[in-house]
Amino acid sequence: MLRVVLSAERATHPWSPTTVMSLGAEGATVHYAGDYPLRRIQQAGRRLSEQGVLAVALEGPAWSYDRQWAFYSGFRPTRGDVALKWASSDEDELELLNVRRHVTEWACRTINATPQEMYPEQLAQEAIRCLESLALPGQVSAELISGEALAEQGWVGTWSVGRASVHAPVMAIIDYNPTGDSEAPVAACLVGKGITFDSGGYSIKSSAGMVAMKCDMAGAATVTAALAYAIAQGLKQRVKLILCCAENLIDGNAYKLGDILHYKNGVDVEIVNTDAEGRLVLADGLIVASETNAPLIIDAATLTGAAMMAVGEDYNALFGLDKALVLRAQQVGELVQEPAWPLPLEKWHQQQCPSAYADTANSRPVKGGGASNAAGFLSRFVREDGKGWLHIDLAAAFRDSSDAHWATGATGLGIAHIAALLLA
């Protein structure tokens, strides 16, 4: 293993005094002094990974929990395994690092998996297994509603988006109940977009826009991993996880522009863009969540490119009509070093996708305010004018290519944030 130590001193190389790392006979030294030390540490991890280093041992007293995690985030490759020995001697901190690594690697493997491997039912089953691996026996139960049963029960969004695929769409309602009481109240619901591949449907994407669309189920993977991480940290309250899983493909049976979907809560939606499918499946999940009367509902999705344009790839975007909850979520994100930034959402955003034929369309035919308009659409499907509801647009969940801090593919950003919101 390559020995890696931290130094608060700047590198002494005359040709590069601002370098983040130096190599010597004793191993590697990470120079974290300067602005944004955690980013500098993560950058050093990425550089070692790019140089082909496969095994490191973090040594020395300067490695705090956050610094170790920052290094791991950069060091973790897209493919293959690496060996990393944490510097922590505290058993609780060591256990927390190991379980966070476990759930993050599960989520990243799941998101990076090919659409052939990770189709809707497979995603649902993988999520159940992930939670069962960390919960006690009997604490996790699940109901899977698949294929024609979705249409029969009125889950029109998930059914319509996924019906053109040979892989049936699935809604997974997973119940984590550590209380042992089947009548225990649901403390929170997590809703995840699980589009395992998104062609755009008849509003078809270009090849360049479609090639990474295996990642469109990152919302489902992120909320699953977040619940798993919270369980491992001792979550004692009942939480329901609703995953809305489908492949958005083209076939003679596919849903079409001009179709009108009649949702169970009475909202009628005209389809004007089959590539605005994520909000259609999430609407089903939000109806399920609202029916539980849970005081906290969080949905997460790789929903809009507009959110990424607004906040970049280092932040996730926050939306909510409950302003106090949005502020608290932003503060929690800062505490766990997974920053998220609020974008505008008001009740009038519900009217930003007008339709002459239905209560609303699923998109706007013109550009502008796309992320807020999508959140406004979702707000139609939560109870009490959005009290206790938080929407997270996962702008930072996936990288199309590597950069100075991240390998190509899934990042895992959002997992610790959502877990902390559950535990709070």
Image (spheres, rainbow, N blue to C red):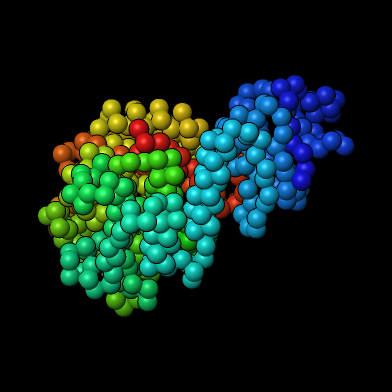
Where 184 falls versus 140 (above or below)?
Answer: above
Decide if residue 25 is on the left or right side of residue 283. Answer: right
Q: Position of residue 43 (x, y in %)?
A: 66, 37
Front one among 143 and 118: 143
Residue 348 shows in the view: no
Front one among 391 and 200: 391
> Which residue sits at x=20%, y=44%?
185
Question: Could you tell me which quadrant the C terminus lies in?
Answer: top left
> Which residue sits at x=75%, y=23%?
10
Q: Position of residue 204 (x, y in %)?
A: 40, 65
Q: Position of residue 351 (x, y in %)?
A: 20, 43
Where 207 falls versus 294 (above or below)?
Answer: below
Q: Position of residue 163 (x, y in %)?
A: 30, 71
Q: Quadrant of residue 340?
A: top left
Q: Quadrant of residue 97?
A: top right
Decide if residue 423 is on the left or right side of residue 314. Answer: left
Front one among 288 and 260: 288
